[in-house]
Amino acid sequence: MDRTGAVAALRQAVAVAGERIDGESWCVALSGGPDSVALTAVAAALRPTTALIVDHRLQAGSDTVADAARRQALEFGCVGAQVLSVEVGRAGGPEAAARQARYQALDSARDGAPVLLGHTLDDQAETVLLGLGRGSGARSIAGMRPHDPPWHRPLLGVRRALTHAVCDELGLHPWQDPHNADRRFTRVRLRQEVLPVLEDVLGGGVAEALARTATALREDVDTLDAMAAEALAGARTEAGCLDTARLAPLPDALRRRVVRAWLLAGGACDLTDIQIRGVDRLVTAWRGQGGVAVASGLRKQRLFAVRRGGVLTMHTEPV
């Protein structure tokens, strides 16, 4: 990576993305690492910027790291910089729990402004590989969206090496998160072991190819989701249930999307393919079977999808 001109290249990428981001100001999620530091330095020169620094309190000295990032943001010219201390739970594993706590904190602190996130093309490639390995379907392999208001990822089209080059060009010394080298985390092993092997075996360009795959699949997913929204409106009863007679003739992929959207609207969360297909069988393979339990966002409540009188309904039971 040429270390000269890196700042200009990154500024151009953020400026182009900014054309699709509403508002006269924005926030940046700043961890103190190279990607978010480079993004913050560039963003602050383009639009009034508030840095939001999430302290997960998972490592000794995390408060010191967060305060250093806060002071650095002000040196960049940010109009504000705020440290957000969070409590990380255990649901879904350490990575998922930290991510949930982080996004909740950012959403509460953004005060209606859009939030820039420092995910790069390399992060996108890793996300696609994770989705492939887990068999999560097209939605997962479609990766992260460049624009998913209030979240925006202006660096999804640039390699991680560019953000490091920006830091070098500006003479910055960003924090190196030890978790990013901890092989206990699947994403770290993908980054350090799997992707380099794929690059070697396939002759390079793998990260870019995976990112292109995500873009193509995202277009397909968006089209199917729009069709599913229309089909859901046609199959929903006045009571908010689903008419199985209207669902059954739909193509499999479209019908399962309708089921997924209906479940989410009813309070389900973190749905798996197994759960969606289980509910789908209440439509396509009805043999009088009982309800299907799905993950619920309701505290101390279990959510069930059941078939009664030719319609799908949902009910909750206390845990």
Image (cartoon, rainbow, N blue to C red):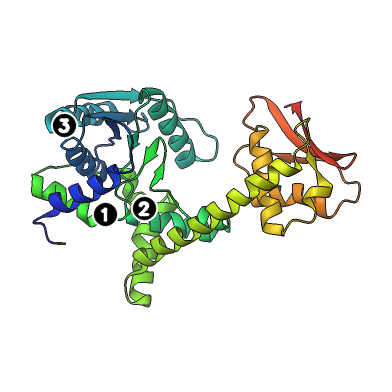
Residue 282 visible in the snapshot = no
* Amino acid type for the residue under numbered disc 1: Arg
Residue drawn at point x = 12 percent, y = 61 percent: 2
Residue bearing the label numbered 1: 160
Q: Which image quarter is the C terminus in?
A: top right
Q: Residue at x 29, y 31 (%)?
A: 27
Query: In percent of the image, x 21 and y 27: which residue is there?
Result: 70
**Residue 97 visible:** yes
The local secondary structure at tag 1 comes to helix
Among numbered discs 1 and 2, the one appearing first in the sequence: 2
The location of residue 167, given as percent across then percent down, is 15, 47
Q: Residues within 10 Å of mark 1 (few under 14, many from 20)?
A: some
Badge 2 or badge 3: first in the primary sequence? 3
Q: Locate residue 277 relative to residue 52 in the image: left or right.
A: right
What residue would you read off at disc 2? 123
Q: Are marks 1 and 2 in contact (CB under 8 Å)?
A: yes
